Structures are given as C-alpha cells and as structure tokens.
C-alpha cells in the first residue's frame, strides 16, 4: 500500500484548515439543538424521547446515507461535493430557525443529516490523501476533534445566543456562519490541485471492490469497535446541558458553558490520544489496537465512577477525565482502517467507518439515552453509558490479538 506523499506541503495544511473549519460548522449545526433542549421542551411540551429523536435523527441520516453519498463524491469530485454538503446543512439549519412545529423541526434536522452524511468520510479521505502515512492517527484524531470543538462552539454559542435572543436566533446565527465558510472553501480549495498533490486518480467509472472494504477480521472488528466506542461520545454532547440544568439546577447559559468546557476536554483528549497512538505505534503497528482498547476501557471505568458519585465538584472532575478519553478510539480506529485498505478506497472505507460510528454509536446514543431517561431519569440513563465502551475495549483487544506483526510502515 502506498504511503502517500512524502511530506506535508503548505497547501495540504491549507486544505486541512478549511476542512477543519467546515467540520466546525458541521458539528455546530448538529449540536446547537442540544443547547436549547430546555427551551424547546418547555415551549413545545416535549418528552425526553422526542428530544432525543431530534438529536439522533441527524446521525440516523448520516448512517443511512454516508456510503452512497461518499461513493457519489468520489465520482463527482470530493472538493465540489464538500462545498455542496456545507450549503445543504447550513440552509437546513436556517430552516430549523423558522420551524413552528415539531414536525418541521424534525424535517429540518433530517436535512442537516443529509448535508452532513458524507462529510466526515469524504473530508477525512481528502485530508489523509495529502499527508504522509506516518501522520494518519494524528490527522484522523485532529480532524475528528474538529467535530468535538464544533460541539463546544455549538453548545456554548447556542446557549448564549438563545439565552439572550431565543432559540431561533441560535439556529440562525450558526446556519448563516456555515454559509460563509462554505463560500470561502469553494473559492480557495480547487479539485485539480488537490488531485495532483494527492497523486490519486479519480475512481469514476469503476465499481467499488466491496470485499476489500470488509476484508479480514481486523478491519471488520475495527468498524465494530469504533462504533460502539462512540456510543457515549454521541449521548453525552446531546444530554450534558440538560443534565447540568436538571441535576445541578444551573441556568441555561451556565449549563451550556460548563457542557462546552467538558466537550473541549473531549476534543483535546481525542487529539492527544491520536498523537500518542502515532508515537507509540510508529515502529510497532499492532500497538494501535492495544491503545484503542486501553482508551475505551479507561473511559468506561471513569464514566462508571462519575455516574455513581453524588453531584458536586468530585463528580465533575471525574466526568472530565472520562470525557478526555471517551472519544479516544477515533484516531486509532481511523489509522487501522487506513492501514487495512488501499489508498484509492479510503473514501469508501471511511464511509464504512462513518456508517459504523453513526449506526452503532452516534445515532443510538442520544436516542436510547432519551428513552431511558423518561423511565430512569437522566442520571439513571447515564449510569448505563459505560457498557458499550467495555464492549469496544474487548473488540479492540481482539484486533490486537489477531493482527499479524508487521514491519514498520514507511515514513
């Protein structure tokens, strides 16, 4: 398998910066809803289950559409496709700002998912193609951390704007900002230059060899472990503002700020986990899976401890430790998928990874947590979040066990 470009150019970093900015917009559009849960619940008299569906329908749409739209993007052009996706999710967010019923809001959220469906896979494939193989875990983690930072900004900005001007203004601000970023991306990033720098010909007219996307136990298990490992990472961003509002009695703006701080910890932890995986696995590739298992296990244990502590500073401190690791498997999982698939198929392979992440983790996380919260209370629902993480740790340990020892990858 090709190691990719031998060095990272200034233009490659520029493309990464714009891709990162679009990912910020992507997740701000996705997570602004969570900051205004208390306002929507009161105004429209919604149950936690219906609130959870508003959050989870985005990930459901992403899970269903990511593979076909990723394949279409590989044929039509990744750069052009990314610009169109950003336009769709930004306009859909503006539709949410104008919604006057639950049904219209649900439709708007589904359209947000339509726009975001292939962005994670196509954007990551675009970025990976422009850098050496030795940076894959770090780049995967840093790119996906843009999603966490977008969640931070979406929750924090959404809470502040909603507290001052109402929840409609929060959606309008983030939807309008997304349109600006999409236009800037279209003006600066060019399809032809990206393809020349990556050195990979477009796949138009060729059938995707699906067997290579699921070939081998390590690759299939990497998809499964990654999805389960992100169950809590999908549930917590959706429900942390509400948890702080209910359990701690905090007003909307302050609960949004604290939740945003915890999400920032999660994003920083994701980047550090990816960087550590690259460092420790550079000459020993099998360590990637071992580190993913360690991240998932430690996060589950910290989360279990946090949910059994009484409300107070100790609980928040342990919860912060859990948040630092709860998405730590993202970088290693991306590196595993990239290592076990050809470069020309990375777009489709990351689409499969996105599918697993959303169907197994990011979509059911907020939805099932909301349903459980209606019966057990939000604290009771949180107490069950470590279970998928424990399963992910076991699966990544299986990957480590069955992967063949390999020579160090080319640098």
Image: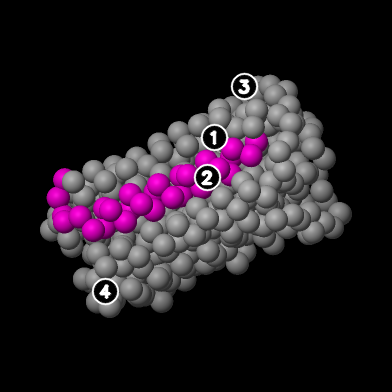
Residue 287 percent coordinates (x, y): 59, 38
Q: Residues within 10 Å of mark 1 (few under 14, many from 20)?
A: many
Element assignment for label 4: helix
> Is residue 44 at all visible to an observer of this figure?
no
Q: Earlier in the sequence, mark 2 or mark 3?
A: 3
Is 293 magenta? The answer is yes
Q: Quadrant of residue 335?
A: top right
Q: Nearer the viewer, residue 45 or 353?
A: 353
CA gap between label 2 and label 3 equals 31 Å
Residue 388 spot, x, y in % from top left: 45, 61
Q: Position of residue 129 (x, y in %)?
A: 70, 36
Spatial separation of the CA atoms under disc 3 and disc 4: 52 Å
On screen, residue 299 versus residue 337, left or right, reads left
Q: Residue at x 79, y 34 (%)?
A: 2
Quick check: can you spot residue 313?
A: yes
Main secondary-structure element of the magenta-colored stretch? helix
Query: Which badge, 2 or 4, is on the more N-terminal residue?
Result: 2
Of 250 and 74, which appears nearest the observer? 250
The residue where tag 2 is placed is 292
Q: Which of the two discs, 1 and 2, labels the residue nearer the N terminus?
A: 1
Quadrant into which the N terminus falls: top right
Secondary structure beneath label 1: helix
Badge 4 local density, few (<14 within 10 Å), some, or many (20+)?
some
Q: Are marks 1 and 2 in contact (CB under 8 Å)?
A: yes
User: Can you identify the residue that label 3 sits on?
Assistant: 10
Q: Quadrant of residue 366?
A: bottom left
**Cα distance in 3D space between marks 1 and 3:** 24 Å
Label 1, on which residue?
A: 277
Residue 376 is marked as 4
Q: Earlier in the sequence, mark 3 or mark 4?
A: 3
């Amino acid at each position: 398998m090709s190691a990719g470009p031998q060095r990272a150019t200034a233009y490659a970093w520029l493309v990464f910066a714009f891709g990162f900015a679009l990912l910020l917009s992507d997740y701000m559009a996705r997570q602004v809803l969570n900051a205004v849960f208390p306002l929507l619940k009161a105004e429209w008299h919604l149950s936690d289950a219906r609130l959870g569906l508003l959050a989870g329908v985005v990930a459901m749409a992403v899970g269903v559409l990511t593979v076909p739209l990723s394949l279409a993007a590989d044929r039509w052009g990744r750069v052009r496709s990314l610009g169109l996706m950003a336009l769709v999710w930004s306009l859909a967010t503006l539709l949410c700002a104008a919604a006057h019923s639950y049904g219209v809001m649900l439709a708007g959220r589904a359209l947000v998912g339509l726009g975001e469906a292939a962005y994670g896979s196509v954007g990551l494939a675009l970025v990976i193609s422009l850098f050496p193989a030795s940076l894959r875990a770090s780049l995967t983690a840093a790119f996906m951390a843009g999603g966490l930072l977008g969640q931070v900004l979406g929750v924090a900005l959404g809470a502040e704007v909603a507290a001052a001007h109402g929840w409609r203004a929060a959606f309008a601000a983030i939807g309008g900002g997304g349109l600006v970023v999409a236009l800037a991306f279209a003006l600066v990033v060019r399809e032809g230059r990206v393809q020349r720098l990556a050195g990979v010909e477009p796949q138009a007219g060729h059938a995707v060899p699906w067997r290579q996307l699921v070939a081998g136990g390590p690759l299939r298990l990497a998809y499964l472990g990654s999805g389960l490992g992100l169950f809590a990472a999908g549930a917590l961003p959706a429900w942390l503002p509400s948890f702080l509002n209910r359990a701690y009695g905090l007003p909307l703006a302050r609960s949004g700020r604290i939740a945003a701080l915890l999400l920032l910890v999660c994003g920083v932890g994701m980047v550090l986990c990816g960087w550590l995986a690259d460092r420790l696995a550079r000459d020993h590739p099998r360590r990637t899976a071992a580190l993913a298992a360690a991240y998932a296990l430690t996060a589950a244990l910290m989360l279990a401890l946090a949910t059994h502590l009484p409300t107070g500073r100790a609980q928040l401190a342990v919860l912060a430790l859990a948040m630092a690791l709860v998405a730590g498997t993202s970088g290693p999982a991306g590196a595993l998928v990239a290592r076990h698939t050809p470069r020309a198929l990375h777009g489709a392979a990351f689409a499969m990874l996105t599918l697993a992440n959303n169907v197994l983790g990011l979509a059911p996380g907020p939805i099932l947590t909301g349903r459980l919260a209606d019966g057990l209370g939000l604290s009771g629902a949180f107490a069950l979040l470590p279970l998928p993480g424990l399963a992910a740790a076991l699966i990544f340990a299986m990957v480590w066990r069955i992967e063949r020892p390999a020579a160090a990858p080319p640098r």
